Image (tube, helix red, strand yellow):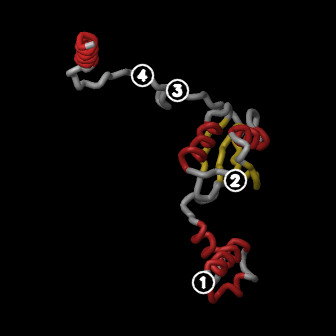
Amino acid sequence: MKTLKNILTLVVLVTIFTACKNETQPEIKTIEVETTSNIAKKELNPNATYAKAEFSIAGMTCKIGCAKTIEKKIATMDGVKYATVDFDRNLAMVEYDEALVNPNSLEETVTNLADIYKVSDMKVVENFSEVSLSKDKECKAKCTHDCTKKDCAKCIEKSAECKKKCDTMKSKA
């Protein structure tokens, strides 16, 4: 029995010493990743007629996972010259070749990414909305007064956006 115990102890010690490495250097692996600089730039037709479209996208939950994914998918479509998705305003702005892309194909591209994305208010525009305007600035620009709790009654006659802001303030009060 003592011999068996000594052999078992010896096996455990040999296993420990041979399994442990004294080197603390991590293993380095190189993985090639395709970046935007590696992707060939798509050729745009200089003679094409370009249109601009803006539309709302409901269902986005984050800037990087949702908005950037949608933006990248639209931007890589054939015939799309420019695409940006503003997460804060739930707004997509796309400039595209009318011969290759139409508003229906833009909507289809977004909704095919995930069932939660819903496109609405699709409109062809002459110029894109100003990206720098926040909801508050838009509301103040539309209103002739400052939307505060005491001024909410005045919002009934004002724009829908201003009324919405005042309604929100009423519910928080």
**First along the sequence among labels 4 and 3:** 4
**First along the sequence among labels 1 and 2:** 2
Mark 4 → mark 3, Cα distance in angstroms: 17 Å
Residue type marked 3: Ile
State the mark number for residue 148: 1
Q: Which residue is mark 4?
A: 31
Q: Residues within 10 Å of mark 4 (few under 14, many from 20)?
A: few
Q: Residue at x 63, y 42 (%)?
A: 70
Q: Secondary structure at mark 1?
A: loop
Mark 1 → mark 2, Cα distance in angstroms: 28 Å
Residue type marked 1: Thr
Q: Position of residue 55 (x, y in %)?
A: 71, 52
**First along the sequence among labels 2 and 3:** 3
Which quadrant of the view contains residue 11? top left
* Residue 96 visible to an observer of this rendering: yes
Mark 2 → mark 3, Cα distance in angstroms: 30 Å
Residue type marked 4: Ile
Q: Secondary structure at mark 4?
A: loop
Q: Position of residue 131 (x, y in %)?
A: 57, 58
**First along the sequence among labels 1 and 4:** 4
Which quadrant of the view contains residue 44? top right
Q: Residue at x 76, y 39 (%)?
A: 108
Q: Nearer the viewer, mark 4 or mark 3?
A: 4
Q: Which residue is mark 2?
A: 58
Note whether 158 is above or below 63 in the view shown: below
**Quadrant where the C terminus is found in the figure:** bottom right
Q: Are marks 2 and 4 in contact (CB under 8 Å)?
A: no
